[in-house]
Amino acid sequence: MLTHLPRELHNHIYHLLPKASINQVSLTCRSLYASALPTLYSTLVLTVKSHIRQLEAGLQDHDGFLYQVILHHTKELVLKCKQSGQCRLLFDIRSLLGQLPHLSRLTLMDFHTLPVSYIHPLLSSLPQLEHVALRYCDLVVNPSPHQVETVVSSVTHLELLWTDFSKPAIDSLLACFPSLVNIRLLANHNRHQMANNYAVDALQRQCPRVTHLAIGVQEVKEHTLVSCIAFYGLQLQALSLLCHSPSTLLAITKYAPLVQDLTVRFSLETNWYPPPPPPEPRSSPSITTITTTAATGRQRQRRNDNHEEEEEKSKKGGLLCVLYHCQRLVRVQVESRYAPSSSASTGDDCLPPIISKALATVAQKRITLKNIQAIHHNVTNSSSVIKQLALDHHGGTVGLAAVKDTNNGTAKQDEKAALRRATDIQAHISASANNDLLSKRSSSLRPETILVLDDEQLKEIRSQASPQM
């Protein structure tokens, strides 16, 4: 029976179930209630004052089981405002924070007007806090001569999602977290003019230790992005940003060659290639004969493709340049969004050239999709993925040096060893229109196709790099 299983197996099963199902299991008997309670209370979601009062009443008995569970197992607190954007919930929760000594994650949601000074008392009451997330909020600053800034050195992760802020508000918020190593500035409504660009500048002044950086906010100037990449430089391990032009990619190769996880997003405004130089004046006019036969068109297309490939290798600031110079890359994700065409054509012509070339490269590698199943938008280095990729090990398509043949009695090494010995670059090419993936593709390609290059293939590619690079 389920009640006879060890507690460790109970916890593993509970982590695979939704909270509603865990709640139903806990009501079946006392034994399962006791085993499910730590998982149920690992995250507290409080929305109104009555929830806080009910929880405080249940914690009156310090010898009770509920008190012990919350004291030792509650790691995350989510405060979601449902009272017309009022901040009263932030005052009501203060009396409860002293009974959550092991809380490490704090999330504030739906506070339409959130003064940064209201967050300070929460931060000072949580000594073990590491992650702070603000979602669907609007940060403001209430000027006060008696306001005291709170500095929380324990917080290392900060996420802002659909959260707007003024320039003084983002300055005040970042000043609280001088030890940040992971920051995610994701999309917002851009309600304050040039505040997003100012926030990226403020990062360099307030948070010098950042190693994982994701910039998804709008209206950030290219020179600000380049300056930010140059500031953090060699310490960057993960980087996600919107590419405006080859200058952004050039900054990555020049200042952040040790990056391991790179996500580059292209948009309609992206300048894919530098402007061509002006044509040289000719001494005498020439007559060009244009033929429209299919054979001539294909030859001209091949010449153009070869010219573009050589240009991509020789010029600085391209994706190939990033691959050549960033030797420690283990994951590359390239995203592109394009406007749907009004014409009937839905083929590769409507894709940006950099995405079309990437898809063509995948097709040339002829990696069968049956060996890369159930891998969609997020690429994970799980053991099951490694097993699937290892199926082509003897055929020469994909090589993982750390996956050995079990028929010889040699045990497969663990996942971390495999990733260390075989530097796999996983390029997830996702082309989307209006947040939907392409629905029409040739029979041999899908938008979820993943290109995996082993260590030998990387050496071969890098050996062909242009001497100019």
Image (cartoon, helix red, strand yellow):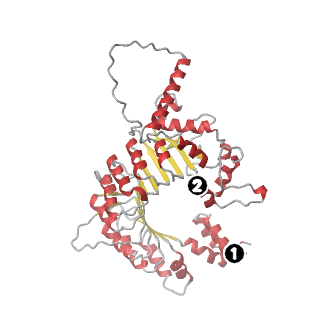
In the displayed structure image, the side of residue 388 where residue 127 appears, left or right: left
Q: Secondary structure at mark 2?
A: loop
- Is residue 46 depicted above or below 270 in this figure? below
Rendered residue at 52%/35% (across/down):
356
Q: Quadrant of the C terminus?
A: top left
In the displayed structure image, the side of residue 402 where residue 216 appears, left or right: left
Q: Position of residue 370 (x, y in %)?
A: 68, 44
Query: Mark 2 = which residue?
Result: 380
Q: Mark 1 is on which residue type?
A: Pro
Which mark, residue 115? none
The earlier-in-sequence mark between 1 and 2 is 1
In the displayed structure image, the side of residue 64 where residue 203 appears, left or right: left
Does the image show residue 282? yes
Q: Position of residue 358 (x, y in %)?
A: 53, 39
Q: Secondary structure at mark 1?
A: loop
The residues tagged by marks 1 and 2 sit, at their Cα atoms, a distance apart of 29 Å
**Which of the 4 image quarters holds residue 275?**
top left
**Of 283 and 192, the residue lying toward us:** 283
Count of all numbered marks drawn on residues in the image: 2
Residue contact at pointers 1 and 2, CB within 8 angstroms: no
Q: Mark 2 is on which residue type?
A: Thr
**Of 405 and 91, the residue lying toward us:** 405
Q: Most extreme residue toward the front, as rendered?
A: 467
**Circle 1 residues within 10 Å: few <14, some 14–19, many ≥20:** few
Q: Quadrant of the N terminus?
A: bottom right
Which mark, residue 6? 1
**Which of the 4 image quarters holds residue 36?**
bottom right
Q: Most extreme residue toward the left, as rendered?
A: 145
**Of 407 and 65, the residue lying toward us:** 407
Q: Position of residue 16 (x, y in %)?
A: 62, 63
Q: Position of residue 20 (x, y in %)?
A: 59, 65
